[in-house]
Amino acid sequence: MIVKIYNRIYEFKDGTPNEVLYFFKERINKVPKDVYYKYLDWWPSCKKFVIGDCDITGQYTENRMDRMMSRKYHKNKLIHPSVIMKTVCNSEEWKNVNSEAQLIAQNRPGQREINSISVKKVWESDKADKWRNGIIKHNQSEGKRLKIKKASSRLWQTKEYRDMMLDKFEGFQGVSGVFYSKYSGKLRFDSTYELFYAFVQDLNGKKLKRFKGEIKYVMDDKERGYRPDYIVDNSIIEIKSKWIMEKYQTLKEITLKKEAAIEFVKNNNFDNFFIFMEDELSSIGPFNLKDRIISMLEDNRHILIKHGKIKKYKRRDEKYLQVEELITKWNLLK
């Protein structure tokens, strides 16, 4: 039925209770939620407010009636705005729309450079330590670590994602790739130190293979894991830069990893565990020629660099000739 109230036309259902009409005739703009719920099927779409405690949080709130009726989530429920926002933002539809919008926004010309400048300013400010500690604390939670592990494992199965992520590390100084070993076939390396070690062991006639799995250890009451690099002569080898270990790992962490590795060796029929750093690598080969060896290996297509950049050497000086002799010796291996 059509009712005219104070020169305004309202459309009500036939038989609308007088309790509903009362709020219109008396120009009362706020309707208690118990009254609204009692006559839920009789209210017309209008701009009156439903008031009361949120059905989920218990907080006092006000919802406009016409919006309550047209909502996709929590339709006709008195809900605090924060609850509505949380519900909407957790829906798959919203996530997909927001993801597409973010991709467009973040890939606009010049946007990456603007983001980079902003991040650098924060890292150079007094907020850097607070930011760093917050990130560390967040990422150390067991739930977060498990979530990252599952997501990374799933995404890395696709070539498109791998290529995209590697492109993002264009300025990264680390080097990784594949070494076409004489004795070990295609051998992955994740640093120039690992590649140097693999090359020298090839010259020595040693067969290497990558360590698979993780060695578990406990630190600060949490189980963690790490992967050594190679297995050679039934011994487990971990190759590290002394500078990186001192800068990024505590003595406690290094000690616990080593103790766990020694225990792993005992329980899994390995002979020994060794950590090779600069001094140990120098004792098995010409470590001072490492970068020149890698440069010539790439020139001769004996390695494939998948990530990072290496320094190139072209000048035929004394060191160049020494490296050339080593590469020639390696080429003669069967």
Image (spheres, rainbow, N blue to C red):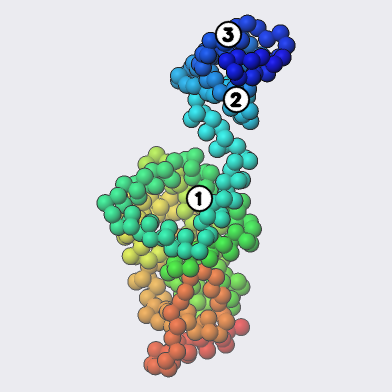
Q: Position of residue 327 (x, y in %)?
A: 51, 86
Instruction: Tell me the SS state at disc 1.
Output: helix
The label number, if any, that marks residue 22 in the structure image = 3
Q: Amino acid at mark 1?
A: Asn
Distance of label 2 from label 3 (alpha carbons): 18 Å
Q: Which disc is residue 267 wearing?
A: 1
Q: Residues within 10 Å of mark 1 (few under 14, many from 20)?
A: few
Q: Residue at x 43, y 79 (%)?
A: 311
Q: Position of residue 65 (x, y in %)?
A: 58, 22
User: Could you say which is closer to the camera, residue 7 or residue 78?
Assistant: 7
Left or right of residue 1: residue 113:
left
- As displayed, is residue 271 above or below residue 138? below
Q: CA distance from mark 1 to mark 3?
A: 83 Å
- Viewer-proximal residue among 297 and 217: 297
**Which amino acid does the dot numbered 2 rest on?**
Asp
Which residue carries the number 2 mark?
66
Q: Can you say which quadrant of the picture contains the C terminus? A: bottom right
Q: Report x, y in % for residue 72.
A: 63, 30
Residue 89 percent location from the top left of the image: 55, 38
Q: Secondary structure at mark 3?
A: helix
* First in residue order: circle 2 vs circle 1: 2
Residue for point 44% across, 68% down = 171
Q: Nearer the viewer, mark 1 or mark 3?
A: 3
Labels 2 & 3 near each other (Cβ < 8 A):
no
Disc 2 or disc 1, which is closer to the eye? 2
Residue under the image location 40 percent in, 64 percent down: 240
Q: Earlier in the sequence, mark 2 or mark 3?
A: 3
